[in-house]
């Protein structure tokens, strides 16, 4: 969008997508319309201050023309004002989702907005929702400090006016109070607290009301069947939907890609930085030898990091003594007037404050003693085993004598150490009081390296050795506040622990004094003014070790900047913050730590002959150099035996060493006004340990050294220094000391070693007045004294070279200097610009949390200038017009800081004028010139924002701009700010195809919405609803910010990039959510007002529906969610009553997807999160670490309720005042945070702002925001459940409104698609898992719709009835008793209305059957899925499920009989003429409903049995088949069950049976299509050619039964020509797989007619080619004759109790050819044994009759007999091939041998009888089942002779078969010959001859039988002879064949000879019609 202020076009159009809108545009009378082709004028026209400025929003005009740059002038303050004109109005066009729409004009007159906020309508509005109060106030606040009294010493305050100006400014900072801007909370509105989210219960969660199956449906639900019926909408449902609602977004987790917005930094209260603290007290130190003298203790902390060469002392020293034997010391000198030793010097406890932990930190305890001579001699008794008492007494006397003379001089004695932290950095002494006995001490050394060695080596040796304990030292160590975690981080980010622990100041420690001896809270002085409790002294921790300098004369060798000083702790456990542990100086500190290190007096010469051996030092602070004997300033901190502050201090004595080393620490208070004369005077002494006759004083002065503290206007730098030592210092010795040794005037004879720097020392300055950096010192000194401007400018430029540490420490003082320069109008531009650049460099070096603290508390414009804001804006404008890109970027980066200063300065200025809380129009607050400069600043910032190549910086900058605008909305004219907002929104981008610009806009709007006045700024007051054509213009103009946002959303919907579209949609959704959850607006009237603000979005979505419908599912939901916010029926009603009703496609079925879960079958325990979190396609599941927590148990429900109540009550509590209060902060945020349970959307300012509750809640693919765990997954589930209810109620509400307003039209035209869509929406809701509270409302609405729209449901040709019936039957099997009751009631209501509409209920009969079947099928699939996952199926639940269905059917039957009388029936059903059937009378309703019940119960029963017999594949197949026959009147179900049977058979490799199922299914399809006259006459229908079973299976219903449901049956794809073909092709496929080639060929005969009719030549060709291959295969098989066909077995079952269904029944089992009798026996035994137990399963012998009475009825008995197909001779003549003889079988035979005596086998053939059993099955094999029931059994008994005749005849047949085989099989022929002729096996036929044909037996038998036996024997003999000859021909040429032939010939001759005794044999062989040819002679 072109924001060029030079565009004079006054009118821009707003595109609308409303196709119904008129072309007339809303135009304000005061505006004029120009042609769109108006050209952009030149820049000269910019200065034309027109009243209306037009902004073109053309996609082509993306350039941005800022205001022209101002020419440079000598002074910024005197430069020309910005020439940007005052914009009073803008006419803009609203973007739209598509092109070619009607245009609307939106005229913005920004000068009118401010007055609108004071209109009477706003003021008098009873809701006060648009009233914006002046909430700002500014006040002084007492600074928070633990120091009692002023932190500045009284002496310093008394000399304040005499101090230099720079020092005065610093002290002013130390003593000033904080200046804080407060923003009061908005006045309370007439809102109500949020209701506690109700706990919605769901059946799938295990929350249901249990009752018995019969009890639940004992009665119907009266509300669903009122009499008379209640029309839609039902008043009770409407009332429920009005009252039982919760804010939509209170239940919704917004999970999108909107980035986190950082809240504006609000400085934390400035409090003391507290680390890990512990108190140490030494209660006893006692040598084993005895206490003969006083000991003086010191303790400090030492870091023994092994990487450090010497280790580091990290704290100052704490001096103490135990008060023993002090009386032996010399009395105080009378010249000191008996100075009392003050209480602080006698402190026994010290408090250490650590900002890091390390296992290398040790507590070191040192004890000094009075030096009495040679330390080796005077301390030797302490380190030896105590001697005799006399020796000890002698030693004691020597000590006492020496103390009186040398008591003021000390030497190091012993040291010991205590380890504080273990290897895990855990404090070892973590108990409240820890008493430690330290016994190991070592002799002290003056070298730190020795201390390091002692700690790291000697201590370890001591722990491992049994050394004697020569000293007893008792310590008491007490940690403080180890669990007292602080809410916020400290300023500098340091911490007391590696685990990021933070601690509060412990207020339980009494008697605290800090390191400057200032008393601290809590302070309770006693009656004498002294502290009433024992004092505890805080010990300061040093931030870093001093730098080590190189040696170079007497000058400071620290030439490197402080940045280069090596931090000796850098390799230790680092503080948690990455920045230095540095804080700005806000309290007075001015200390010097002086560390004498060494002196070399080897070359010392004295005129007095003084000796330089036992050396010690005296330190004094002097302010002049007139005399070395002058008394020093009382500024040196004393030890435990000196006053608090003393004028001089001695170091310890180093015995007999001319090059002594010192380790003393001298702590000195520096004066506030240092001068070049202030210096330390070091006096070197020799101590005479022996009594001297020359002098009473043991000490002798050796020389002096002067150390300047303030030279060249710079305080002495930290580090190591070296100085020369003089033997004499004359007056004015500082000048002498300063002279170069090479200077001739230098008197070198007074200097030791020719003035070489023999004395080395270190210094450490801790001062808030004097910086270490020279540049900083000069800047603070000269800038406020009006020094040279060139020098001032130069200092500003050099500020960048100053260490960040020093800039941070002196930040308040530096920035005050810079501000004063910037507001000084007399300075030139260069100086002011340099100051501004220095300001940017400064803030870039200071931690941001310190900057925010400075803005919030420290900054006070009154100390600089009340118009600082104006000066800053002018200077910033000048910078932005320059070419200093680095500085410009820096100003943009820290714009938030500049904005904060400007804001506070503006508020202070307005407050000074008395206009801050007037509640009046804000226009007069600021001059027009300032407004122009501010506008010019915004314009330039916008230009640089668009030109920025750093997207991250741009994102942060737009947020800063938006927060600043929010601030300005509290201060300035709202119309002026609206214009700035408009410029930024329209100026960023107009093409809406830039993701980067869209991201910036999104952030901009999101921040604007954070203002707690956001709703009021959009003026949500009531007004007359405009005509539809003017909706856009009216709403956009009236509701300014939301109007702009909606325009951007509308424009972005047309974007090609999905992410770009979603960006603005999600932005809108977030803002909606924020105020939907704001308790300030939680009242019905307020919510309606706020809802109306977004109403154009409804129109936007409606008109962009075509575009949105092409979006992905998740994007569609994002676009549609906002529509659910519009729950105000009033608005919807106004829209639907408009000339063009709201199209109902805004509530398409897709939009009603419940976020709960996709359907009722989705387990609830997989869903514990918000929608679009883990699956953006609508599944609302959130997984948390693979676990789920539901509200199933009452304990969880109570817990969740308590949590919600607690969170809501806390959210409605009072909030403290804060500097800023946005809608997500403070008051409102408490509600959002606790209700949503998240703070992820907004984050606190870095540096430790307390986290503010967020406006959005996130969840990570499978993970929950950490803050959410405060409430656990129960809260997530609770919100999800309520969201489901809210969406469902919203959809129902919209439906009711739509039906109500269009009811008459809908009733008139029930074929309308609108009616169909209404039911689809209802159906979508019913299919979702709904809460119990919603189900009743939903069913109530449905019941009224059924009564009014029954024509649509029961008469029209649609699927509404079928889908609704199935969905309702789902509820009939619910565990929740009320659901079952309501489902049963609705089914009765459906049947009743079906009768009323049609006079019969055929449709409900059909759909009930289908529904029950589908429910059972789904149940079976679920169980199968469980089994695959090895999850057991709960038998009790299964039983309960079926009991529910049985009870429901009984109840339905009962109440249909009661409520539906026969008068509803038509007298007869007139059939359709195409069925050619006469009308038939109807049976009574009672009979019909009973028949329906029995049918459905049969379906259920079969399904139950399928579950029960899942272990038995044969029984399961029987049940599948039985179920299919149940659905004769439901063809689709019948075919479905048959196909299920086919799949089951395929899975068990029963391919022939599976093919039969497909063939019979095809036959049924053919039959049903014939009934419906849908089949072509040419289609083949003679299925008997394949199987004789088909005619028996073609049981079809009476055609008249199908007439009324014709449109609802045969809908499967199988009921088409192609479906018919597919079924046959499937049969062919499985037949080929089983090698049943003949059946394949026959099946093709059914296919070919269809292909021929369709002239499908290609498929015919393919079929014939396939037939050729099949025929070839058949030919080969018949030739080889090696095919093995199925085996058949008769199986009888006896199981009266276990399986009564098959008890006493006999079946024929068809098994694959490789399954033998033993295999089948084993399978059945295992199959039933696994089910019932092996001990209950028994196999009966197959050759004995079964005595049933002797069997145990509780066991299972199985008898298995192998059977053979039985074909009579007539059949054999027809069935010539083996395949034909083994196919289409229904008769089988088996034989049972027996004797009359009861034995199975007799002793001779004359006793052997035989029984032949012929079995007949109910169908032919192959069939759809591999087991068929035996329906007929015939038994034939054969006498012994008949049995013998049959045996011989079988042998004849076998030999004849061998002779006829082609090619001949030599092997099998020889085997059969051997069985008949060889001696050992030929007794059978001969025995038969001798038994029946001998003279003795001949007469005993029937003559006919004798004759027959003789004929058979004769035939047998002839066949044997021919076979013998045939074998000879076959084997005559083979090796070894003649030998067998000879044996066979001998055997034959013998056999023939014996047979001839009984039978007359001819000499010629009978012609057996055997033609021996070459083929026959081919043998194997």
Image: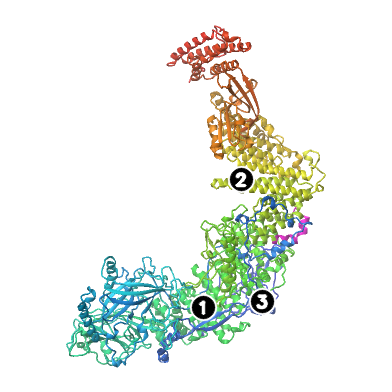
Q: Quadrant of residue 1811?
A: top right
Name the residue that disc number 2 marks.
1420
Residue 1430 visible in the picture: yes
Q: Residues within 10 Å of mark 2 (few under 14, many from 20)?
A: some
Label whose residue precedes the other's in the sequence (2 or 3): 3
Is the residue under label 1 in contact with that under label 2 (CB below 8 Å)?
Answer: no
Tell me the tag on residue 128: 3
Q: Residues within 10 Å of mark 3 (few under 14, many from 20)?
A: some
Label whose residue precedes the other's in the sequence (1 or 3): 3
Query: Magenta residues?
Result: 1293-1311
Taking the image as shown, residue 1902 lies to the left or right of residue 691, namely right
Q: Secondary structure at mark 2?
A: helix
Q: Secondary structure at mark 1?
A: helix
Camera-side mark, 1 or 3: 3
Q: CA distance from mark 1 to mark 3?
A: 30 Å
Extreme-front residue of the structure: 389
Up the image or down, 1699 lies above or below 857; here it is above
Percent of width and height locating residue 1862: 53, 20
Taking the image as shown, residue 809 lies to the left or right of residue 1232, namely left
Up the image or down, 6 lies above or below 1108; here it is below
Q: Residues within 10 Å of mark 1 (few under 14, many from 20)?
A: many
Q: CA distance from mark 2 to mark 1?
A: 69 Å
Residue 1658 visible in the picture: no
Taking the image as shown, residue 1366 lies to the left or right of residue 371, namely right
Taking the image as shown, residue 1934 lies to the left or right of residue 1379, namely left
Q: Nearer the viewer, residue 766 or 1690?
A: 1690
Q: CA distance from mark 2 to mark 3?
A: 62 Å
Q: Quadrant of residue 435?
A: bottom left
Camera-side mark, 2 or 3: 2
Tell me the tag on residue 900: 1
- 1191 in the magenta segment: no
Main SS of the magenta part reads helix
């Amino acid at each position: 969008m072109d924001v060029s202020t030079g565009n004079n076009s006054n009118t821009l159009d707003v595109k609308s997508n409303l196709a119904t809108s008129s072309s007339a545009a809303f135009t304000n009378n005061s505006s004029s319309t120009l042609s769109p082709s108006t050209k952009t004028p030149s820049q000269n026209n910019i200065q034309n201050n027109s009243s209306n400025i037009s902004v073109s929003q053309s996609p082509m005009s993306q350039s941005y023309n800022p205001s022209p740059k101002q020419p440079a002038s000598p002074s910024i303050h005197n430069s020309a004002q910005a020439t940007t004109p005052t914009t009073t109005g803008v006419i803009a066009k609203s973007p739209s989702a598509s092109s070619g729409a009607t245009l609307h004009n939106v005229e913005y007159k920004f000068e009118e907005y401010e007055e609108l906020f004071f209109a009477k309508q706003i003021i008098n509005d009873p809701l006060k929702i648009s009233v914006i109060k002046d909430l700002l106030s500014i006040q002084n606040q007492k600074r928070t400090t633990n120091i009692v009294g002023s932190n500045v010493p009284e002496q310093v305050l008394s000399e304040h006016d005499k101090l230099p100006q720079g020092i005065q400014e610093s002290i002013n900072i130390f003593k000033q109070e904080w200046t804080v801007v407060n923003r009061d909370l908005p006045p309370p509105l007439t809102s109500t607290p949020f209701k506690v989210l109700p706990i919605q219960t769901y059946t799938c969660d295990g929350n249901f009301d249990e009752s018995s199956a019969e009890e639940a449906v004992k009665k119907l639900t009266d509300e669903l069947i009122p009499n008379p019926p209640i029309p839609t909408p039902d008043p009770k449902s409407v009332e429920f939907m009005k009252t039982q609602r919760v804010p939509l977004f209170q239940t919704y987790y917004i999970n999108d890609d909107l980035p986190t917005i950082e809240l504006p930094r609000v400085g934390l209260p400035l409090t003391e930085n507290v680390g890990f603290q512990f108190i140490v007290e030494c209660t006893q130190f006692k040598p084993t030898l005895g206490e003969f003298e006083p000991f003086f203790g010191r303790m400090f902390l030492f870091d023994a990091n092994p990487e450090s060469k010497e280790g580091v002392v990290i704290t100052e020293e704490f001096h103490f003594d135990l008060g023993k034997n002090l009386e032996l010391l010399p009395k105080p000198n009378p010249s000191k007037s008996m100075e009392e030793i003050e209480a602080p010097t006698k402190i026994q406890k010290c408090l250490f404050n650590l900002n890091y932990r390390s296992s290398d930190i040790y507590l070191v305890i040192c004890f000094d003693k009075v030096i009495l001579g040679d330390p080796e001699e005077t301390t030797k008794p302490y380190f030896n085993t105590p001697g005799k008492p006399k020796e000890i007494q002698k030693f004691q006397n020597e000590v006492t004598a020496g103390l009186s003379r040398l008591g003021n001089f000390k030497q190091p004695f012993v040291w010991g150490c205590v380890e504080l932290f273990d290897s895990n950095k855990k404090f070892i002494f973590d108990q409240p009081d820890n008493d430690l006995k330290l016994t190991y001490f070592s002799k002290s050394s003056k070298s730190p390296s020795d201390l390091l060695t002692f700690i790291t080596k000697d201590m370890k040796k001591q722990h491992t050795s049994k050394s004697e304990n020569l000293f007893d030292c008792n310590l008491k160590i007490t940690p403080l506040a180890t669990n007292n975690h602080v809410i916020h981080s400290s300023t500098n980010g340091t911490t007391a622990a590696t685990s990021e622990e933070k601690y509060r100041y412990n207020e339980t420690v009494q008697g605290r004094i800090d390191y400057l001896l200032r008393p601290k809270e809590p302070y309770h002085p006693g009656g004498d003014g002294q502290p009433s409790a024992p004092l505890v002294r805080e010990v300061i921790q040093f931030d870093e070790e001093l730098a080590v300098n190189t040696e170079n004369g007497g000058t400071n060798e620290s030439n490197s900047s402080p940045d280069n000083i090596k931090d000796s702790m850098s390799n230790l456990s680092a503080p948690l913050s990455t920045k230095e542990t540095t804080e700005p100086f806000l309290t007075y500190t001015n200390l010097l730590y002086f560390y004498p290190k060494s002196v070399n007096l080897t070359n010392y010469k004295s005129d007095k002959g003084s000796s330089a051996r036992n050396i010690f030092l005296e330190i004094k602070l002097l302010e002049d150099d007139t005399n070395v004997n002058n008394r020093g300033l009382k500024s040196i901190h004393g030890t435990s035996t000196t006053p608090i502050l003393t004028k001089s201090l001695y170091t310890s004595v180093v015995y007999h060493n001319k090059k002594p080393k010192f380790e003393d620490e001298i702590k000195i208070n520096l004066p506030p006004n240092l001068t070049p004369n202030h210096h330390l005077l070091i006096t070197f002494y020799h101590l005479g340990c022996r009594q001297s006759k020359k002098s009473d004083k043991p000490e002798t002065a050796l020389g002096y050294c002067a150390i300047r503290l303030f030279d060249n206007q710079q305080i002495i730098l930290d580090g190591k220094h070296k100085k020369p030592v003089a033997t004499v210092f004359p007056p004015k010795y500082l000048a002498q000391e300063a002279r170069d040794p090479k200077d001739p005037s230098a008197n070198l004879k007074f200097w030791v070693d020719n003035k070489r720097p023999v004395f080395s020392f270190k210094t450490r300055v801790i001062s808030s007045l004097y910086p270490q950096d020279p540049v900083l010192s000069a800047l603070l000194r000269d800038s406020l004294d009006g020094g040279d401007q060139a020098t001032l400018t130069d200092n500003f430029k050099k500020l960048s070279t100053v260490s960040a540490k020093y800039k941070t420490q002196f930040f308040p003082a530096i920035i005050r200097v810079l501000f004063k320069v910037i507001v000084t109008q007399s300075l030139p531009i260069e100086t002011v610009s340099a100051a501004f650049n220095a300001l940017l460099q400064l803030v870039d070096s200071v931690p941001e949390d310190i900057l925010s603290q400075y803005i919030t508390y420290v900054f006070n414009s009154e100390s600089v200038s009340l118009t600082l804001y104006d000066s800053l804006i002018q200077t910033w404008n000048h910078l932005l017009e320059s070419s200093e890109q680095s500085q410009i970027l820096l100003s943009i980066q820290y714009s938030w800081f500049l904005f904060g200063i400007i804001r506070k300065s503006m508020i202070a200025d307005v407050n000074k004028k008395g206009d801050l809380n007037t509640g009046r129009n804000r226009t007069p607050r600021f001059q027009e010139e300032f407004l122009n400069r501010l506008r010019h600043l915004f314009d330039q910032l916008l230009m640089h924002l668009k030109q920025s190549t750093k997207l991250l910086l741009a994102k942060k900058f737009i947020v800063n701009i938006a927060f600043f605008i929010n601030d300005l909305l509290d201060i300035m004219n709202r119309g002026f700010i609206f214009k700035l907002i408009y410029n930024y929104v329209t100026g960023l981008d107009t093409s809406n195809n830039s993701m980067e610009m869209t991201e910036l806009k999104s952030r901009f709007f999101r921040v604007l919405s954070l203002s707690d006045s956001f709703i009021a700024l959009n003026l949500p007051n009531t007004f007359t609803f405009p005509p539809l054509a003017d909706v856009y213009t009216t709403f956009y103009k009236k509701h300014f910010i939301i109007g702009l946002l909606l325009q951007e959303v509308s424009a972005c919907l047309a974007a090609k990039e999905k992410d770009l579209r979603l960006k603005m949609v999600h932005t809108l959704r977030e803002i909606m959510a924020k105020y939907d959850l704001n308790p300030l607006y939680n009242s019905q009237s307020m919510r309606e007002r706020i809802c109306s603000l977004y109403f154009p979005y409804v129109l936007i979505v409606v008109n962009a529906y075509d575009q949105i419908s092409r979006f992905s599912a998740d994007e569609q939901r994002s676009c549609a969610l906002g529509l659910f916010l519009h729950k105000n029926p009033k608005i919807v009603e106004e829209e639907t009553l408009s000339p063009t009703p709201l199209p109902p496609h805004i509530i398409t079925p897709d939009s009603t997807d419940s976020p709960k879960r996709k359907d009722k079958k989705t387990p609830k325990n997989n869903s514990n999160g918000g929608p679009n979190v883990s699956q953006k396609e609508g599944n609302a599941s959130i997984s948390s670490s693979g676990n789920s927590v539901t509200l199933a148990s009452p304990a969880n429900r109570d817990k969740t309720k308590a949590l919600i109540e607690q969170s809501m009550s806390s959210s409605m509590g009072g909030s403290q005042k804060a500097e800023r209060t946005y809608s997500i902060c403070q008051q409102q945020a408490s509600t959002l945070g606790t209700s949503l349970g998240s703070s992820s959307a907004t984050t606190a300012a870095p540096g430790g702002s307390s986290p503010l509750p967020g406006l959005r809640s996130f969840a990570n693919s499978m993970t929950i925001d950490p803050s959410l765990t405060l409430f656990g997954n129960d809260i997530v589930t609770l919100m999800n459940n309520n969201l489901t209810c809210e969406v469902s109620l919203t959809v129902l509400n919209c439906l009711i409104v739509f039906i109500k307003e269009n009811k008459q039209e809908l009733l008139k035209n029930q074929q309308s698609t609108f009616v169909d869509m209404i039911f689809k929406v209802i159906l979508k809701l019913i299919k979702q898992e709904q809460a119990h509270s919603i189900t009743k409302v939903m069913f109530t609405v449905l019941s009224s719709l059924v009564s009014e729209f029954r024509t649509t449901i029961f008469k029209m040709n649609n699927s509404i009835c079928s889908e609704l019936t199935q969905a309702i039957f789902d509820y009939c099997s619910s565990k929740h008793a009320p659901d079952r009751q309501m489902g049963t009631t609705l089914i009765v209501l459906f049947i009743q209305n079906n009768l009323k509409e049609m006079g019969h209920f055929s449709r409900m009969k059909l759909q009930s059957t289908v529904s029950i079947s589908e429910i059972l099928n789904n149940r079976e699939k679920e169980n199968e899925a469980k089994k695959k996952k090895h999850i057991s199926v709960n038998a009790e639940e299964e039983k309960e499920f079926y009991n529910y269905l049985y009870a429901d059917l009984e109840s339905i039957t009962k109440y249909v009989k009661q409520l539906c009388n026969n008068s509803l029936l038509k007298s007869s059903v007139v059939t359709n003429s195409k069925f050619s059937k006469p009308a038939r009378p109807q049976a009574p309703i009672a009979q019909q409903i009973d028949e329906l019940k029995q049918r459905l119960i049969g379906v259920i029963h079969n399904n139950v049995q399928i579950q029960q017999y899942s272990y038995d594949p044969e029984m399961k197949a029987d049940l599948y088949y039985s179920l299919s026959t149940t659905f004769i009147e439901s063809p689709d179900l019948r075919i479905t069950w048959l196909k299920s049977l086919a799949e089951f058979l395929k899975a068990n490799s029963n391919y022939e049976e599976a093919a039969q199922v497909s063939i019979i299914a095809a036959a049924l399809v053919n039959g049903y299509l014939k009934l419906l006259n849908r089949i072509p006459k040419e289609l083949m229908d003679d299925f008997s050619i394949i199987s004789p079973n088909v005619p028996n299976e073609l049981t079809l219903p009476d055609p008249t039964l199908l007439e009324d449901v014709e449109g609802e049956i045969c809908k499967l794809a199988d009921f088409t020509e192609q479906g018919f073909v597919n079924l046959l092709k499937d049969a062919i496929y499985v037949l080929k797989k089983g090698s049943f080639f003949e059946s394949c060929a026959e099946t093709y005969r059914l296919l070919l007619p269809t292909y021929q009719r369709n002239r499908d030549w290609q498929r015919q060709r393919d079929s014939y080619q396939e037939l050729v291959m099949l025929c070839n295969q058949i030919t080969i098989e018949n030739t080889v004759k090696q095919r093995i066909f199925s085996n058949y077995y008769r199986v009888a079952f006896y199981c009266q109790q276990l399986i009564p269904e098959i008890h006493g029944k006999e079946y024929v089992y068809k098994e694959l050819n490789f399954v033998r009798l033993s295999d089948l026996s084993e399978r059945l035994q295992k199959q039933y044994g696994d089910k019932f137990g092996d001990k209950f399963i028994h196999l009966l012998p197959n050759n004995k009759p079964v005595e049933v009475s002797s069997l145990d009825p509780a066991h299972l008995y199985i008898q298995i007999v192998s059977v053979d197909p039985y074909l009579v001779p007539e059949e054999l003549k027809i069935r010539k091939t083996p395949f034909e003889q083994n196919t289409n079988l229904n008769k089988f035979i088996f034989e049972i041998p027996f004797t009359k005596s009861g034995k199975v086998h007799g002793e001779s053939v004359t006793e052997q009888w035989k029984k032949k059993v012929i079995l007949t099955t109910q169908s032919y094999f192959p069939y759809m089942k591999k087991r068929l029931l035996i329906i007929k059994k015939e038994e034939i008994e054969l006498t012994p002779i008949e049995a013998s005749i049959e045996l011989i005849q079988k042998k004849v047949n076998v030999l004849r078969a061998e002779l006829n085989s082609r090619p001949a099989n030599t092997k099998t022929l020889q085997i059969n010959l051997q069985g008949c002729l060889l001696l050992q096996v030929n007794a059978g036929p001969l025995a038969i001859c001798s038994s029946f044909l001998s003279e003795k037996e001949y007469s005993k038998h029937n003559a006919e039988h004798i004759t027959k036996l003789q004929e058979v024997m004769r035939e047998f003999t002839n066949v044997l002879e021919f076979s013998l000859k045939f074998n000879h021909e076959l084997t005559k040429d083979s090796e070894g064949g003649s030998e067998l032939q000879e044996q066979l010939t001998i055997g034959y001759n013998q056999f023939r000879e014996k047979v001839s005794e009984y039978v007359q044999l001819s000499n010629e062989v009978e012609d057996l019609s055997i033609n021996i040819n070459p083929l026959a002679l081919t043998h194997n």
